[in-house]
């Protein structure tokens, strides 16, 4: 049974062999919309269960915040995939599944004898998705295929770090794990496209997203900039290379963002700043004019924002010019938008007396809303249920647990 009943993906059966962030985030997106996601973990559990932070009163440490956030709505079964019995059980699970997702290095599943071709031979409609640092040879052999990769590597190689930073010579890592999360979202999209094809034709396929490729696609602007100008874009600080003004500005109690992607917004901003003459000044008339005088334009806006608080700037610009304060986590928790959109959700945390808060799904649907219906599972919490559904009896399951084939 789906843990998020009534979701748009109710009835979709997903076998999740992923660990760390990219793979679990992908399958989380599917689970949030009602897919029945069975997480296959090593007997000792997913290594990320040991990543914090942990609640002060949690003495059990079944998992920390890292695992809780991206493994909600899933079932868990511990399975030794190196044992013949473990592989046989995986095959039985996959035989009736719609999707398999894994993010091991290329060739790992093949060497275990449970790669795509082997599983698809028994389930031709299977959609098998892989998220790897540099892709899979099935769709294009990268010279880096054997390299391990994580978020920071994808950010660096895909171009994100090269256009992020305080100045032209200081690249910086972006705060969130976009090197994992954006490829994960692309993979979820690819999976659903392949599932749609499989439902129409009965033909499954291999879906491959390289983390490098995903970040390169996200940084599409640097590609066309280089093509059009012949120059490699560099870190641009808190302003924009094409739009002006468009960036971050200091104020009395922090920082705010202001963007004028259209000239009409600049006219509104000039009026709000008490400088209506700027709207007709030839130096600032159009975006390209302002870009040619970017330093002066930014300085004018900064002079205005420095003398005001976030609230005062909001009062002056709200509804007229794109604007937003630079929020801390505490600001986000207090924001009425976040409350109205129910973007923070409380879930149980085993071992802690109080619930914890995690980010909810931003994907909203009127008929099939989806959402967070259950905390992350403990290792093997659903093993009995999942194996019983395959027809195994209680004694047989107990014997497999005793031999550490399952957990």
Image (cartoon, rainbow, N blue to C red):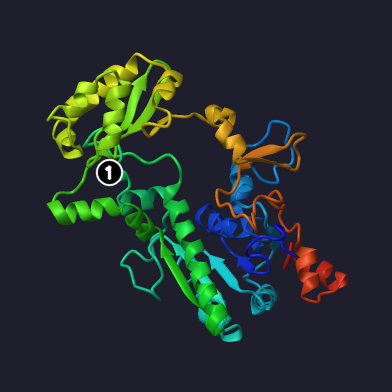
**Residue 297 location, quadrant:** top left
- Residue 165 position (above or below residue 384): above
Which quadrant holds the C terminus? bottom right
**Left or right for 380, reference 276:** right
Residue 236 visible at all:
no
- Residue 381 position (above or below residue 234): below
- Residue 190 position (above or below residue 350): below
Residue sticking out furthest to the bottom: 121
**Residue 188 at what x, y percent from top left?**
51, 62
Taking the spot 55% from the left edge, 52% from the top edge, the residue there is: 363
Read off the residue under disc 1.
163
**Residue 359 at what x, y percent from top left?**
59, 43
**Residue 56 at what x, y percent from top left?**
69, 31
Taking the spot 14% from the left edge, 30% from the top edge, the residue there is: 293
Q: Nearer the viewer, residue 307 or 278?
A: 278
Residue sticking out furthest to the top: 307
Taking the spot 75% from the left edge, 34% from the top edge, the residue there is: 354
**Residue 210 location, quadrant:** bottom left
Count of numbered circles on the image: 1
Residue 42 visible at all:
yes
Which quadrant holds the N terminus? bottom right
Q: Secondary structure at mark 1?
A: helix
**Residue 95 at what x, y percent from top left?**
65, 79
């Amino acid at each position: 049974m789906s843990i998020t009943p009534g979701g748009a993906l109710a009835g979709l059966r997903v076998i999740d062999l992923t660990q760390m962030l990219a793979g679990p985030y992908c399958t989380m997106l599917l689970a949030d919309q009602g897919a029945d996601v069975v997480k296959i973990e090593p007997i000792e559990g997913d290594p990320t269960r040991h990543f914090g932070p942990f609640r002060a009163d949690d003495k059990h440490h079944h998992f920390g915040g890292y695992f809780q956030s991206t493994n909600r709505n899933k079932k868990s079964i511990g399975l030794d995939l190196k044992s013949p019995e473990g592989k046989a059980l995986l095959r039985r699970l996959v035989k009736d599944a719609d999707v398999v997702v894994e993010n091991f290095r290329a060739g790992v599943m093949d060497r275990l004898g449970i790669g795509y071709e082997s599983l698809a031979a028994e389930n031709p409609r299977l959609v098998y998705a892989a998220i790897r640092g540099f892709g899979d040879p099935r769709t294009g052999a990268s010279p880096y295929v054997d390299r391990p990769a994580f978020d920071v590597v994808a950010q660096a190689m895909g171009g994100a770090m090269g256009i992020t930073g305080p100045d032209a010579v200081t690249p910086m890592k972006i705060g969130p794990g976009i090197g994992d999360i954006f490829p994960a979202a692309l993979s979820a999209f690819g999976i659903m496209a392949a599932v749609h094809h499989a439902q129409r034709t009965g033909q499954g396929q291999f879906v491959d997203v390289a983390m490098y490729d995903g970040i390169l696609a996200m940084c599409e602007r640097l590609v066309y900039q280089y093509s059009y100008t012949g120059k490699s874009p560099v870190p641009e600080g808190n302003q924009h290379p094409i739009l002006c003004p468009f960036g971050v500005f200091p104020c009395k109690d922090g920082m705010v963002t202001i963007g004028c992607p259209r000239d009409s917004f600049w006219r509104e901003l000039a009026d709000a700043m008490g400088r209506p003459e700027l709207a007709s000044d030839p130096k600032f008339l159009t975006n390209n004019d302002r870009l040619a005088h970017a330093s002066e334009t930014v300085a004018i806006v900064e002079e205005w924002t420095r003398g005001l608080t976030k609230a005062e700037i909001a009062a002056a610009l709200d509804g007229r010019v794109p604007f937003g304060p630079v929020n801390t986590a505490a600001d986000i928790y207090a924001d009425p938008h976040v409350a109205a959109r129910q973007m923070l959700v409380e879930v149980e945390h085993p071992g802690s007396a109080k619930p914890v808060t995690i980010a909810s799904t931003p994907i909203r649907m009127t008929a099939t809303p989806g959402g967070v219906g259950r905390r992350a599972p403990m290792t093997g919490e659903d093993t009995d249920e999942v194996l019983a559904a395959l027809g195994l009896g209680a004694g047989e399951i107990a014997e497999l647990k005793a031999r550490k084939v399952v957990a």
